[in-house]
Amino acid sequence: EAGVVQSPRYKIIEKKQPVAFWCNPISGHNTLYWYRQNLGQGPELLIRYENEEAVDDSQLPKDRFSAERLKGVDSTLKIQPAELGDSAVYLCASSLEAGGTDTQYFGPGTRLTVL
Amino acid sequence: KQEVTQIPAALSVPEGENLVLNCSFTDSAIYNLQWFRQDPGKGLTSLLLIQSSQREQTSGRLNASLDKSSGRSTLYIAASQPGDSATYLCAVRYDSWGKFQFGAGTQVVVTP
């Protein structure tokens, strides 16, 4: 079974430029998560989707971040414009069910460097 | 504020020694707790998931215990191997629809 796929793996951009990350969850997984992980810290949730609906986006900086999950499968996370403080690893995860009893499966992440 | 703390931040042990990793949380009313492993440049891999009604979970050389009253979980790795070198993170969930609260992790190095 294929795992969670993310692209690109690495991205270097200059501040004020836009950037987008793509995630393909495990087939059949209804719940999709985007996390941000700063160096030396644990991941922090940005947004959670149940199918195509964003059910928890309270931690998403909505002035510059946006996300979508068309057709309830793939998802894209966008930053426009990027700031120096956005440098981090952006992780996508998926789980079969929304309930907390289910394990989350993580992708390898996209390492973003903003210069 | 709900916080999850992992101490120590880094640990080095010789091969064959047992590993003991600690996770503490300030709010004992948890829903479940999960231990993850993260290798450099990679995502997180789930190791063990403990529901609030459970006291421990075991998988191979790994054993995780949960003591809600004291706000602690411990991950034991028996007979450590160089391949166990990674960062280990614990994550706490406070309700079935809530988000995970992650600790910062413990970086483990097992020397041959």
Image (cartoon, helix red, strand yellow):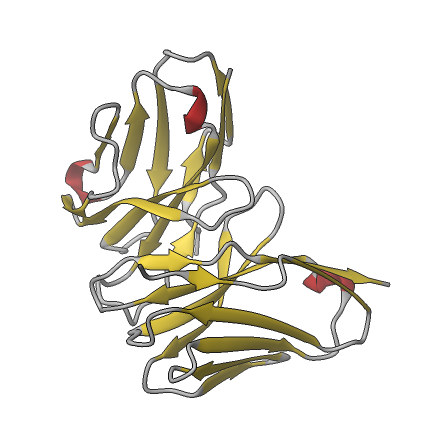
The residue lying toward the viewer, choosing from A93 and B108, is B108
Q: Is residue A21 above or below residue B8?
A: above
- In the rendered structure, the answer to whether residue A18 lies left or right of residue B112 reads left
Quarter of the figure with residue A69: top left
- In the rendered structure, the answer to whether residue B82 lies left or right of residue B102 reads right
Q: For the point 50% across and 59% down, which residue is it?
A: B45
Q: Residue furthest right?
A: B112
Quarter of the figure with residue B15: bottom right
Q: Is residue B38 above or below residue B75?
A: above
The residue lying toward the viewer, choosing from B65 and A91, is B65
Q: Is residue B110 above or below residue B57?
A: above
Q: Residue B105 appears at what percent x and percent y?
A: 55, 57
Q: Is residue A12 above or below residue B41?
A: above
- In the rendered structure, the answer to whether residue A103 lies left or right of residue A84 reads left
Q: For the point 45% across and 21% down, which residue is it?
A: A84
Q: Residue B93 appears at what percent x and percent y?
A: 32, 66
Dividing the image into 4 quarters, which one contains the N terminus of chain A? bottom left
Q: Can residue A26 be seen in this snapshot?
A: no
- In the rendered structure, the answer to whether residue A30 lies left or right of residue A25 reads left
Q: Residue furthest front?
A: B1
